[in-house]
Image: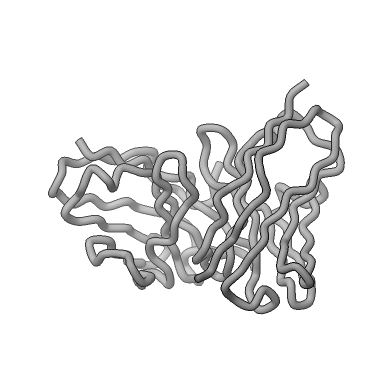
Amino acid sequence: EVQLVQSGAEVKKPGESLKISCQVSGYSFTTHWIGWVRQMPGKGLEWMGFIYPGDSDTKYSPSFQGQVTISADKSISTAYLQWSSLKASDTAMYYCARGSPHFDSWGQGTLVIVSS
Amino acid sequence: QSVLTQPPSVSAAPGQKVTISCSGSSSNIGNNYVSWYQQLPGTAPKLLIYDNNKRPSGIPDRFSGSKSGTSATLGITGLQTGDEADYYCGTWESSLRVFGGGTKLTVL
């Protein structure tokens, strides 16, 4: 069974850094793209970018290029989404999802709250 | 502003049929497959339809998808109260993924 398990909720202050994770199981991590999707409170889905763990090829939405970093560790079948300096506007639910061209399996989501 | 346009809301009575539209352009829907996702309240999205009209295993045939030109449509028949959710279309544009703004389905 394909599973994507995300790290737990985070409460951070503006300016702090953060790295959230998405550990997968039930399939070969290196042969499927893993994407990240943002959902701000009460809003729709926004595709942020994705990574192909096999060769670390990474693509970002123009809206998120330079704002976040997507990475992966093949040794532990885990993808990451990272911020170097959080803003209040980063408060949202973040989902990882497998696949391309369509996302066929999703993580449960990680809630990130950025507040002073 | 989403690249793909969906109506903000639709509603219908239990047992009835509803359709949700997703309008794009030749640079996205017109030249790529469309997928649809259901997001029940407080849960992660789930894939409903992929490659315009295919259903993953476990998705009932009450859900259907179609595409014509630069638009796609999700159809749901035999509406149930459990179908109340947000529905999103998705596709590609220039090797990047795009989603519609989402449609809230209310089953009256």
| Foreground pick, A77 / A36 | A77
Counting the numbered discs, the total is 0
Q: At x 63% / y 65%, what residue is drawn?
A: A24
Residue B57 in percent (x, y) is at: 36, 72
As drawn, is A8 to the left or to the right of A76?
left
Residue visible at 19% across and 56% down in the picture: B77
- Residue B58 is situated, as x and y percent measured from the top left of the image, at 33, 67
Residue lying at 32% horizontally and 58% vertically, measured from the top left = B74
Quadrant hosting residue A60: bottom right
Q: Is residue A21 above or below residue B59?
A: above
Q: What color scheme is it?
A: one colour
In the rendering, at what x and y percent does residue A5 appear? 61, 56
User: On the image, which quarter does residue A87 sit in?
Assistant: top right
Residue A65: x and y in percent read 77, 52
Residue A18 visible here: yes
Is residue A47 shown to the viewer in this render? no
User: Which quadrant is home to the C terminus of chain A?
Assistant: top right
